Amino acid sequence: MRTIAEINDKISNKKAVVWTITELKARIIETSITQAAKEVDVITTGTFEPMESSGAIINLGHTDPPIKIRSCWLDGIPAYSGFGAVDLYLGATQIAEDAEEPKERGGGHVIEDLIAGKSVHLRAIGQVTDCYPRGSFETTINRETINQFYLFNPRNLYQNFIVGVNGGDRPLFTYLGPLMPNLGNAVYSNPGAISPLFNDPDLEIIGIGSRIFLGGGIGYITWEGTQHFPLQKRLSNRTPIGPAATLALIGDAKQMQPQWVRGCYLKNYGPSIMLGVGIPLPVLNEKVVANCSILDQDIVAPVVDFSIPRRVRPTFGLVSYAQLKSGQIKIEGKRVRTAPLTSIFLSHQIALELKEWIEAGQFTLTESVAQLPMDRNFLPFLER
């Protein structure tokens, strides 16, 4: 048994043994779960994938004379301004209202530019009041000229997801990218056995207040994510067979690096954001390592047919991540090529970078202040 305080003391003295999740799994195969648990203090996980339920809080500071912003555009992309006078929220998937503006560019691209230190055009219209007499203004902003700039993401880090296919007769353009007709391809969006939440299946190690790697800076878990569904059916190893737990995350975007926060565009679907997230798992006991021993052949995802335009779509059963990563799966006897929307390579790099931070004493662990709920069901919207 270890405590987080004991592990942090080792980190501060640069004596902590830190392994990436890949290194841990290899060590377990070489020795055993028990032996690996004796040797390692922290395990680092990571993923780099589209996380469209993300966005940025921006506080501009007050103009002279002051303005109470009620409509605002950043590089032509609308930002929500229904807060205080100069507080904004820019959603990653927001697109320009102007028909002449390119639809390939969205809020995620503006967030990436601000993180990279670039200047962004801002246009604002205000509600004129006695204390906020200004009606409008235009200017440019960058991350150094604004007060607060932080990511506040309602839903990140799905604990498993689906595999998308198209059994119809025309191409479909989806949040998983293009799906070719007649089962022409299959797309998945999870790095598999290295994914953070697969390795803490019952959310026993992480919780509200856990410190994480977010976009190349330090972030925190703030709450359950939207569509949090821990009651999803699970295998005997406790991993879910489809979309399950999610996390809400927060972090100072002024610390982040553009290589880990990238605006992206999914053809004929819309803009999104690619986000790098890494979670350290403190080895408090042997069970932590046992949970992390899963391999790609031990976890599965459902193959969902997007050609049926309904909330609940038919599936072609479950496939393992080992099958998905082999480059092809079989559906009703047909070989279907597979591809990840997630960058497997960059997911490994995030786990490695987080490991280096911890080894250098630059990143310590936090005790969670509350557990994430494990009793949430997923409610469909019922029209009344």
Image (spheres, grey):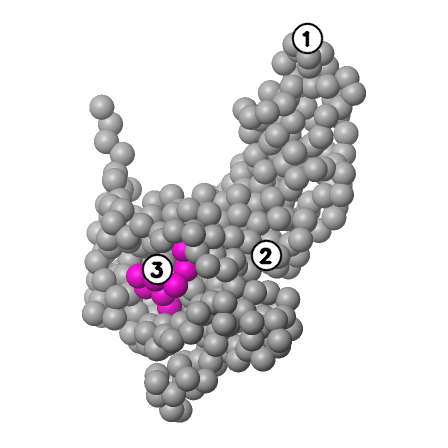
Q: Quadrant of residue 28?
A: bottom left
Image quadrant containing the N terminus:
bottom left
Which residue does the image show at 40% across and 91% down from the upper left?
A: 30
> In this image, 68 relative to 89: left or right?
right
CA neighbours of label 1 inside 10 A, class few (<14), some (14 to 19), many (20+): few
- Mark 1 vs mark 3, CA separation in Å: 50 Å
**Mark 3 highlights which residue?**
203
Tag on residue 83?
A: none
Disc 2 residue type (three-letter): Ile
**Mark 2 highlights which residue?**
218
Q: Kindly check if marks 1 and 2 are in contact, taking CB atoms under 8 A apart as contact.
A: no
Disc 3 residue type (three-letter): Leu
Residue found at the very far top of the displayed protein: 130
Q: Position of residue 300 (x, y in %)?
A: 29, 67
| Mark found first going from the N terminus, 1 or 2 | 1
> In this image, 109 relative to 53: left or right?
right
